Image: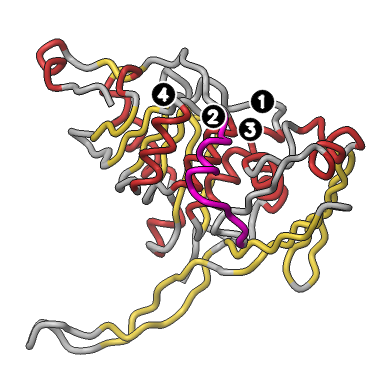
Amino acid sequence: MEKDCDSLVPVVAIRVPTAEGAFAPREEPCFVTEEGHVTVQVREVGTYVLMCTPREEQALAVGFLFSEGLIGGLGDIATMESQQDEGAVVRVELTREALRKVTWGGGRVVVSSAGGAGASKAEERISRLPRVSQGMRVEAELLGRVSRALLARQEAFKRCGGTHAAMVFDAGGETLAFAEDMGRHNALDKAIGKRVLGEANCGGCGVMLSGRVSLEMVAKCARAGVELMAAVSAPTSLAVEAARSTGITLCGFVREQRASLFAHPHRVRVAEGSREALTRA
């Protein structure tokens, strides 16, 4: 079998019928997504092991550090180097100013569920999140457009069905960064990390996601300045609470013909005949 993505691993499965007489059991060559880990070592701060699709390691590391609040931009990194051993290792040294903020500034590092543990009560976490700007406005049809664009780029998912994706887009729907990974959090970190590595930010941007939206996902977007989150699946209750608290427009169940707006729907312009049905969250 030929593969389109270097993150895919060929395997052989046995396909069996779940209804009598549907077909005879048979071997089926297929692909699964590669699972590995990236170790992010931040000198004088800590070590984080991220289970992920081990590709685009520096984008993942930078996005993770940024979306978890350890850095405020590429300028906070003094040095960064990658090494391939038994799994990828990304070694990061922060500038002295950035290190003081992390170590002695009274801040607290919250690690996402993709990478580890250490969360306080949800209410406290939400209260500490920054509020995002309020400049972004989009047409409702853009939600369906970016959903289609996300799916069109998911080459690994098309081959194996085992990856998530995240895409950063602007108010016109133009794709600014895209990433796939076995983990929802990792895909988002990689996409954000690509923006940071390009010395850009996500302020005034939206993010399209392939899966469920949790509190951790909203927290990452709030720290990155993302104003609108759209996802093909549902948000959790804490995700809705966090989006309302931080000012993020949260859109779930984004499909070809519809979307559900759970928080701050004012950024999404709908057709005149539909406005009476739009309830402000």
Label 1 or label 2, whichever comes before in sequence order: 2
The residue carrying pointer 1 sits among few (fewer than 14), some (14 to 19) or many (20 or more) residues within 10 Å by Cα, namely some
Residue at image location 54% in from the left, 58% down from the top: 113
**Residue beneath label 4, please?**
173
Between the residue at mark 4 and the residue at mark 2, the CA separation in whole angstroms equals 9 Å
Determine the secondary structure under disc 2.
strand
Determine the secondary structure under disc 3.
helix
Between the residue at mark 4 and the residue at mark 3, the CA separation in whole angstroms equals 16 Å
What type is the residue that disc 4 sits on?
A: Gly
Hey, which residue is sitting farthest left in the picture?
Answer: 21
Label 4 or label 3, whichever comes before in sequence order: 4
Q: Nearer the viewer, mark 1 or mark 2?
A: 1
Determine the secondary structure under disc 4.
loop
Which circle marks residue 195 in the picture? Answer: 3
Between the residue at mark 1 and the residue at mark 2, the CA separation in whole angstroms equals 10 Å
**Residue beneath label 1, please?**
200
Q: Percent position (x, y) of residue 99?
A: 86, 40
What type is the residue that disc 2 sits on?
A: Leu
100 with respect to 250 (left or right) = right
Please tell me which residue lies in front, 49 or 110: 110
The vertical placement of 230 against 43, above or below, is above
Between the residue at mark 3 and the residue at mark 2, the CA separation in whole angstroms equals 8 Å
The residue carrying pointer 3 sits among few (fewer than 14), some (14 to 19) or many (20 or more) residues within 10 Å by Cα, namely many
Residue 122, magenta (yes or no): yes
Which residues lie in the magenta part?
117-130
Asked if marks 4 and 3 touch (Cβ < 8 Å), the reply is: no
201 with respect to 86 (left or right) = left
Q: Percent position (x, y) of residue 211?
A: 37, 50
The residue carrying pointer 4 sits among few (fewer than 14), some (14 to 19) or many (20 or more) residues within 10 Å by Cα, namely some
Label 4 or label 1, whichever comes before in sequence order: 4
Label 1 or label 3, whichever comes before in sequence order: 3
